[in-house]
Amino acid sequence: MRDIHARLKQRHHLGQFERQRPGLAFFTVPREYLRGLLLDLRDKEGFSHLVLLTAVDWMEEGLFQLTYMLNNRAEDVTFGIRVMLDRDEAEGDSIHDLWPTAETYQRELKEMFGINFPGSPRIDDEFILEGWTDLPPYRRDFDSLAYSQQTYAERPGRVTHDPREHMKQKLYPDGV
Amino acid sequence: MFSFKPDRSQYPAAGEDGKLEIDLETGKYLKLWQGPNHPGITGNMSVELTVCGDEVVKGTTHVGYLHRGFEKLMERRTFIQVFPIVCRVCVPEPDFNEYCYAAAVEDLAGIEVPEYADWMRTLILEMGRFNSYMMFLGGIGGALGLGITGQWMTYLRDIMLDRFEELTGARIYHMFILPGGVRGHLPEGFEGRMEEVLDTAERYLADIDRVMFSNSVFKTRTQGVGYIDPALFEPYGVTGPNARAGGVAKDLRKDSPYLVYDQLDFDVVTHTDSDIWARSNVRRQDVQVSIDLIRQILRKMPKTGPAMAKIPNVLHWKIPRGETYIRGECSRGEYGYYLVSDGSGYPRRINVRGPSYTHAMALLEHMIPGTNISDVAALMVSLHTYPPEIER
């Protein structure tokens, strides 16, 4: 694992190698070097399986983290490649031409996090949500409780009991 | 051998954005929705078909009917509160969620799980795999008009659920595997009762071989139909039995052994035809592997030992900052959990990687053009997809 990272480090400006356990490591790459790195890993190093592509919202730091998980089956090695994006101008580079299945991940990220991938097929098509106009719901600043309270009416007849008092009343109605 | 090469010159032209330009006004094409409530659909999803005569020229998968925002829910709960939620991501095989989540927490927290718990986890996962395959074998029969197989398989699943109930107290969502280990030990006499279930299963599966796999209608409608070119496996993220049916022996239990799989003796089942028949057959053979594995586990596992590691007070449990990815081979392919902790008492991000995400979306949409309407159900079921994994 470490030798692959060392080989590619200079050419792609890779960040520090963080070994999580045998066979799994994470490192960061600047956005402009991502494509070249993925091509090298896929075509020269045997990382042909795109396991997943997802995002992490580091709202407090004003960043989105894209995580590209790649696996080399023959060597049983998985790399988690991080790309940090400015949260205010969230835009990544589409890799649907490298792995067609990335189209689905990117469409989901656009809908759920508001991260755009220009050029990705059907990027603006609805994936899960229909007619959604609010903040992308998987962003940390989307308050799901407030949304529910504003969108849905309180169900009439619902009573909240204090469990201790309720059970006491139920078991000992005479207060004995 | 049937060649999957539709004459695309007859299809509608594609625009600059790559989308097909379909003018329904011409009367040449018709939109047909298969699902979300349809016997030939796998769970709560739908496929929007554009047909020309009885040939499908385009298929678009629609999901979201079961979206409950699991990943968002998990971010607002403590690590122990997440544990009862994860199993609900996948109804037919919930245990993989429990295992992957628990193992991810343990990996970040540096918890060593007792050996007994590892054996119990493997047992639970194989029992879950058996159940999932029962749903598949019933489903593929149903998609092709063989109603009886669905009833037999439902019965087999049900008697395995009895064993789950005995072991975990629950039939569907077991909540048995939790960070640190498992909730309990084997009940007394469990091995004997499990053996009865496995014997019964083998008798019924022999009938399945005769009734389904020797049935000329089943053969005609599955052999050479729904071919996936093995060259598509990597670009489309195809894993599990769908890849094994095309001759690629991908199986994480062998490729990257976890739990106690390195102490168990089994072979990876493969086929070469990569069609609906091959995918069904691989799963049928894999049921036998699961049955053998359950017997081996019950024979080899320690009879006593701690089921749980010592973990901190879960109400104030903070997991060190970091990220990890845990994966395993479920009945449909690679199942994984990507967990990110920011050092607080709540997960920063949990992402569920279900095999259906790649199989039912990009791959299915790529495969549908050129098929006959009547084959779409069998094609979908043969990919063995569970929609909640897509829209979690």
Image (spheres, coloured by chain):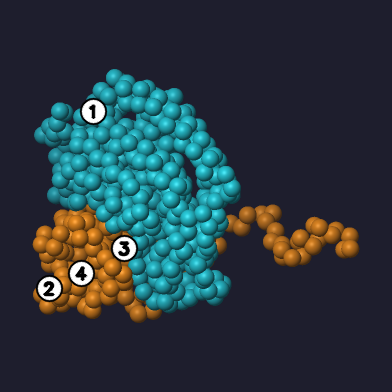
| Image height of A106 relative to A17, above or below | above
Query: Given this view, does label 3 or label 1 mark the residue nearer the observer?
Result: 1
| Palette colour of chain B | cyan
Element under disc 4: loop
| Image height of B117 relative to B232, above or below | below
- Along the viewing direction, whichever of B20 and B116 lies nearer the viewer: B116
Q: Which residue is mark 4?
A: A1
- Along the viewing direction, whichever of A13 and B136 lies nearer the viewer: B136
Query: Given this view, does label 4 or label 1 mark the residue nearer the observer?
Result: 4
Tell which subunit mark 1 falls on: B
Query: Given this view, does label 4 or label 2 mark the residue nearer the observer?
Result: 4
**Residue A20, quarter of picture:** bottom left
| Image height of B276 relative to B132, above or below | above
**Residue A59, quarter of picture:** bottom left
Q: Of the residues under marks 3 and 4, which one precedes in the sequence?
A: 4
Q: Which mark is residue B223?
A: 1
Q: Residue at x 35, y 61 (%)?
A: B326
Do the residues bearing badges 3 and 1 touch, measured as CB atoms within 8 Å? Answer: no
Disc 3 with disc 4 on a shared chain: yes
Q: Residues within 10 Å of mark 3 (few under 14, many from 20)?
A: many
Q: Which residue is mark 3?
A: A54
- Along the viewing direction, whichever of B319 and B385 lies nearer the viewer: B319
The x, y position of residue B128, in whole percent, is 44, 46
Do the residues bearing badges 2 and 1 touch, measured as CB atoms within 8 Å? Answer: no
Q: Is B98 displayed left or right of A125 in the figure?
A: right
The x, y position of residue A128, in whole percent, is 37, 52
Q: Residue at x 58, y 49 (%)?
A: B187
